[in-house]
Amino acid sequence: MANYQQGENYISGNNTEYATDYSNNVNNNNTNYANGNEMVDLNARRKAALAEIDNAKFGWFHIRACIVSGVGFYTDSYDIFAIGLVSSMFGWIYYAPTHKTPYNVDTALKVSASVGTVVGQLLFGWLADRVGRKRMYGVELMIIIVATVAQALAGNGQAVSTWGVITFWRVILGVGIGGDYPLSSVITAEFATTSRRGAMMAAVFAMQGLGQVSAGIVALIATAAFQNSIRADPANLDYVWRIVIGVGAIPGFIALYYRLTIPETPRYTMDVEQKIEKGARDASAFLERGAAAGDYTDNIAVARNEGVATRASMADFGRYFGNWRNGKVLFGAAYSWFALDIAWYGLGLNNSIILNNIGFSGGSDAYTAMFNNAVGNIIITLLGSVPGYWISVFTIEKMGRKTIQIMGFTMLTILFVILGFGYHAILAKSQAAFIVLYTFAQIFFNWGPNTTTFIVPGEVFPTRYRSTAHGICAASGKLGAIVSQVAFGLLKDIGGTNNWIDHLLEIFAFFMLTGIFSSLLIPETKGKSLEELSAEMDEVYANSNHTAVVDQYENSTKALA
């Protein structure tokens, strides 16, 4: 009786030291259920393996997973936001005497990566659920590396311009960046402990802030290095933008080996491939050595667990998300990301324009303009974005994802109302006040929905659709980015150069307001296991051919306890 009590405690994740006792009890003391004994054993092993991951002590293997995933996001962010600096350089190199990059060129350079990202998020999200996380992880990074190097080598020709070539390669770059979103989120979530999962995922995403800062720093150093050449001829900025773009490939090269060698997540192995024994062994090996292990052959593992879990299919996908309980979560997560990216990318890729319009950057010559542009971007990112990311890392397990997301959307609504409706009055009275308010907006983007919209979709969906659903939510966000970029370029000059920015800030306030309401549709995920959030244990049992045996077994253990 005592041993059964211990087994029950272990399954619930409260007493991991009784794993062996529980396993022995399942094998030796349930002979009354001979026909279902094997099924009980497999489900018990699955629960035990998941409990081992969820309740593990935080160690080097968790840090390594965060670093491997985080370096990819560092690269993504660097590549995405560096283009804002490069686009400004193009104005001085190719578009004299105005020194202003035309709307169509500026928009193509900034939107192209987002277009590719939508494709990558949907494609890699689906593939990661279809063929496995491990098989796809690293492929997206190789795409990023190739596309980044190709951009840096782009040149002018009779048939195609430099910006045309860069636009093409940025679409390809976007496919790789898009793949990184669902893969890094899901892999981190499935390897993380329950108590630190949010912090680990937030730390991975926080690398975006460092990527943004690095883009500004590299631009600053390269501009300073070519100071004399640029002053002599602004066309020498051609060297600078190629360096700024090309450096983005370096961290990708460093991280590639580690991504290609990361093990498959035990959850995918057990719940999608339905290889319980291998998944259980891989879980233990990951926690012990940070690598996959297990000598079971695939055929044996599959044969022993055939038919236990629900198989992914279009019909099952429609059934699962057709249920409002699940569908509202997908809609809430997807729309929240869409609303966020309307403002996040509307401002993020146009920081140079905002800073120049308030007199915080720009200059009479190419060198001064580009130097001030880089410095302005660095200051804004360091004051707002980077602190916001890391505040999220250290508070998300205490405050919760939903609380932080609603708080962030609320504060952003207030700030954009003030910045938009008070735009001219604030600038006329105090430029410093505008910078302070703008910086607070950057903080609450990242100590708010920019972080949580990445985390929640990686937690709330079942393993068989976790990556696909995350890809859908992320792609929704990038659609918002595309809409924002196109609209920003079309609307900002109504009534004069950059004369409509105040109204754009007012529009951003409206979308932040809608994000508050969509956030009410998502659950709080703090302190809950992935299986608890997606009711995946219920799905496994409900679709098992041995449901009665499992239920009878669980009832018997409760009675004995």
Image: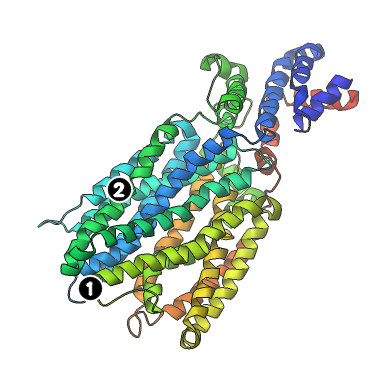
On the picture, is 545 further left or further right than 221? right
Residue 210 drawn at (x, y percent): 46, 53
Find out whether the residues at labels 2 and 1 contact each other: C-beta distance under 8 Å: no
Residue 397 sits above or below residue 283 on the image: below
**Which quadrant is the C terminus positioned in?**
top right
Inspect the image, locate mark 2, and give the three-letter code of the amino acid beneath it: Thr
Residue 5 to residue 520: above or below: above
Label 1: how many residues lie within 10 Å, few (<14), some (14-19) or many (20+)? some
- Identify the residue shown where x is 24% and y is 47%: 150
Kindly identify which residue carries mark 1: 99
Q: Residue 31: horizontal and vertical position, in percent?
A: 80, 11
Q: Bin the neighbour count of mark 2 within 10 Å (Cα to Cα): few under 14, some 14-19, many 20 and up.
A: many
Q: Find disc 2 in the rendering and name its residue.
A: 148
Q: Position of residue 45 (x, y in %)?
A: 68, 22
- In the image shown, does 312 or 45 lie closer to the viewer? 45
* Count of numbered circles on the image: 2
Residue 23 vs residue 281: left or right?
right
- Residue drawn where x is 48% and y is 31% of the image: 262
Above or below, comparing residue 8 to residue 435 in the picture: above
Question: Looking at numbered disc 1 in the image, what kind of residue is underneath it?
Answer: His
**Mark 2: secondary structure:** helix
Tag 1 or tag 2, which sits nearer the N-term?
1
Q: How is the image coloured?
A: rainbow
Residue at 59% across, 47% down: 321
